[in-house]
Image (cartoon, rainbow, N blue to C red):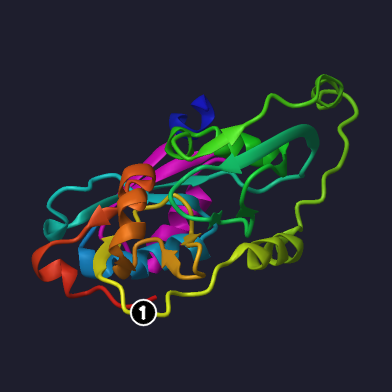
Amino acid sequence: MRDFFEHKIVLNCPTKAEIAAAHRTLPAVGNIEISCGLRDLQTTLQALESADFFGMHIVSKQALERGVVLRAYKGKNGPCYDSGKVASYSGGALAALDDDRHVLLTENRICEKTARIYSLPVYQKTVQITGGNPELLARLQTNPLRFDCDTFEDDAQKLAAQLADPPAHVVEQVPLLYPGPFKMLILPDGAMLQRGVPTLISRSAAQKLIELDDCILLQGEIARLASVP
């Protein structure tokens, strides 16, 4: 994990072009920290995605009305090799979608590169990774086995099969902000909680999301920005 934190760029209210330039400036692996206003949060997140950063998340979770600090990482490009590792999402949603279009449920087979990404501290609260296969791990140094990470369609079908019907009656909703690092959380009823987007979520679901995924319960003027997913 040291490589991701050895090289860092800090920017204040950057433009999309400045974010793209920062990605080019960083070596193959590194991180970026950005300060921006809350109303610029979604635009900044989109610029980070366009520049090929990943794992975007809000570092500062207090006094959001005064601005936010974001951190993101560079280093998700490269070949995918099989090490026999399996990842499981254990947060308050049904599944999570990462910045490489992996739909993470329970016991998803992942490549070694993705396992390295999920080992970052920001993922460790909600992602568990198995130790891998000793023979495949040994092969990584000399004769690695290619791994097909393009499983989005299959994983999406598995997710769809597990979705429950939305509640037939009106439920109380509260305004939440998911700080990341996943691009999106998918709730059991199919509702989607996008990173950095104030969203109205049922109070019962919100309790688990606050506890397990560090979602932020919005207050005051900020709460008015929330909309139904």
Give residue 194's quadrant in the image: bottom left
The reply to whether residue 228 is visible in this rendering is yes
Q: Nearer the viewer, residue 80 or 211?
A: 211
Q: Quadrant of the C terminus?
A: bottom left
Q: Residue at x 51, y 70 (%)?
A: 190
Report the residue at 81% width, 27% height from top.
140
> Which of the pair 88/121 is nearer the observer?
88
Q: Residue furthest front?
A: 169
- Residue 103: image x %, image y %? 62, 57
Where residue 137 sits in the image (x, y, percent)? 79, 24
Q: Which residue is mark 1?
A: 169
Q: Which residues are magenta?
A: 7-35
Q: Going by the image, does 166 lie left or right of 227? A: right
Q: How many marks?
A: 1
Query: Residue at position x 87%, y 21% from top?
Result: 135
For label 1, the SS is loop
Query: Does residue 30 sit above or below 142 in this rendering?
Result: below
- In the displayed structure, would residue 93 be above or below residue 75? below
Q: Position of residue 1 (x, y in %)?
A: 52, 27
Determine the image quadrant of residue 225: bottom left
Q: Amino acid at mark 1?
A: His
Q: Is residue 53 left or right of residue 195?
A: right
Residue 27: in magenta span: yes
Q: Nearer the viewer, residue 194 or 17?
A: 194
